[in-house]
Amino acid sequence: MSEIDAVVKDSYKSPEINCCQNPKIIKNEEGILVCSNCGVTYGQSYLFEERRAFTQREIKNRRRTEPVWRNFGSRTVISNIYKDAKGHSLSPERRRLFSRLNKINHSLVSSMERNLWGARPYLNQIAAKLFIPNFIRETAWQLYLSVAEKKLTMGRTIKGFVSASLYAAIRIHEFPRLFEEVTEIAKVPRNSLHKCLGLIIKRVFPEFGYKYKPITIPPLVYRFGNVLKLSMKTQKTAIAILSKAIHKGLRRGGKDPKGLAAAALYMAAKHNHEHRTQNDISDVAMITEVTLRNRIHQIKKYIK
């Protein structure tokens, strides 16, 4: 059973999902499962690590390999299979010759190319899991190429800089993905990603004239609202609550936008009788319940 079929099957068991009689589920560019007939959203889908493979059939079906041909680096690959094009075994002299050629070929590959050979597949992997569009991937690759040319990866992990380049590209294009999601999917420590991101902003952004755009509250409100299956009326009410509080003097400096967006959604849902627990909202927003209650208390001061 495919992922989409499983979603359709589970939707009939959920009283919160009111879909049509003949749902046709598709996955859009942002990885959100949507019924193309009635427009009902089923939430977001992520690709996670594949299961372990034991049999030859499982290994064949679950294996992910990079193609031999690349857009950069050496085009010639001399394998260790000592057979000619017709499948005949090579003589011992020929084997020694091609073994020597293989070593020479590897010695001609620079450290820069070896770096990129590992970085590009990893970038594509985490970008696919987060459903990042191609134009953002290209921006991330442009940033990482500059990082590699400046040799900023020396003494640091390639995974950290690849993940930081991807998140920097996400912020350049203002795509609705969170910092915590990148760290979770990339399996990179938060502090390491912060340091790599800081170096990219300081050393690479001026070269291309990019500006780091912090995530804003309205996209988070709509995104959290869709995940929580709140109506558009409730989401617009949350935006209105925040606008009123900010207009009356609510300070956003030093506060995580996720907390403010989650607090406004909780208040709007309660006002429109679409009750969601604090635990549900805090889980979706990736914040603690204490933070959620503090932000609710702060917003209430300005909307009385």
Image (cartoon, grey):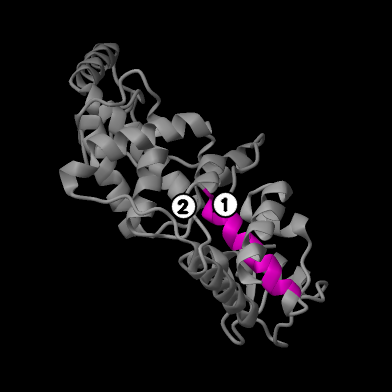
Task: Residue type at mark 2: give it.
Answer: Ala
Residue 221 to residue 202: above or below: below
Task: Give the image quarter of residue 196.
Answer: top left
Q: CA distance from mark 1 to mark 2?
A: 7 Å
Q: Position of residue 107 (x, y in %)?
A: 21, 17
Residue at 58% from the left image edge and 39% from the top image edge = 59
Q: Do we see residue 284 in this rendering?
A: yes
The image shows residue 172, relative to residue 7, as above or below, that is above
Q: Nearer the viewer, residue 148 or 257?
A: 257
What secondary structure is found at the residue carrying circle 2? helix
Which residue is the site of mark 1? 47
Quadrant of the rendered structure where residue 60 is? top right
Comes first in the chain, label 1 or label 2: 1
Q: Residue at x 40, y 53 (%)?
A: 214
Tell me whether the residue at label 1 lies in contact with that at label 2, contact meaning CB atoms closer than 8 angstroms. yes
Q: Number of callouts in the render?
A: 2
Residue count near mark 1 (Cα–Cα under 10 Å), binned few <14, some 14–19, many ≥20: few
For residue 188, above or below residue 33: above
Toward the viewer: 6 or 291?
291
Tell me what residue is drawn at x 24 percent, y 45 percent: 142
Residue bounds of the magenta highlight: 255-270
Give how far across and how far down residue 67 sits, in percent: 35, 42
